[in-house]
Image (cartoon, helix red, strand yellow):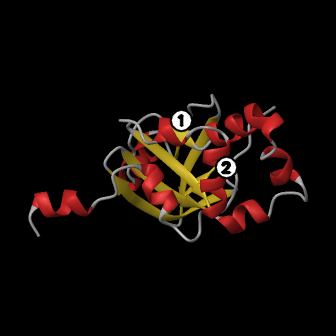
Amino acid sequence: MNLAKFIAQMPATVVDIVAGSADHETLEKAVIAAGLAETLSGPGPFTVFGPTDKAFAALPAGALDDALKPENVEMLRKILGCHVVSSKAMAADVIALAEKGGGTAEVTTIGNCRLRLSVVDGKVKIDDVVTVTAADLAAGNGVVHVIDGVLMPAN
């Protein structure tokens, strides 16, 4: 396949990847409710750690419903902000960064959350509790890594 065909087949944005995934319907709904779809459709680059529907379902009862209420849009933005880094980092980049950092690397998200990334048995872990289950879903403005948990702000 030539490069032009490859680029033409690549999703245009990280939002396109989320919207096209049957496992990310909750994330899509949250991004829209938070008013972040336009931002994440912009030029980026972005690295999005995308929780699956199953990850959202594991939150305490009522937590997601509360976060999706219009009066809680700022809280929802903070939560989603913990899932986005303002650079494009493929899995190999994350692994190299962690190895360079003695086994871990720290990144700060657009929501000002500090994430500690490590590599355990060849898989990227976030804060030792969330695992990247599918990596390198590339888009024109960044990349999405599927995760099995929801990252929450410290406060």
Q: How many marks?
A: 2
Element at label 1: strand
Tell me the residue at 70%/34% (across/down). Answer: 78
**Can residue 105 be seen at all in this image of the molecule?**
no
- The residue at which mark 1 appears reads as 107
Nearer to the camera, 144 or 4: 4
Judged from this view, the residue extending furthest toward the left is: 2
Percent x, y for residue 140?
31, 48
Instruction: Please tell me the numbered disc located at residue 30.
Output: 2
User: Dot 2: within a 10 Å radius of its alpha carbon, few (fewer than 14), some, or many (20 or more) residues?
Assistant: many
C-alpha separation, residue under disc 2 versus residue under disc 1: 23 Å
Q: Is residue 94 above or below residue 145?
A: above
Tell me the residue at 81%/53% (across/down). Answer: 64
Give the residue type at disc 1.
Val
Judged from this view, the residue extending furthest toward the right is: 61
Displayed quadrant of residue 80: top right
Quarter the C terminus occupies: top right
Element at label 2: helix
Percent x, y for residue 150?
70, 53
Determine whether, in the image, residue 51 is placed left or right of residue 137: right
Q: Is residue 24 above or below residue 13?
A: below
Tell me the residue at 69%/58% (across/down). Answer: 149
Quarter the N terminus occupies: bottom left
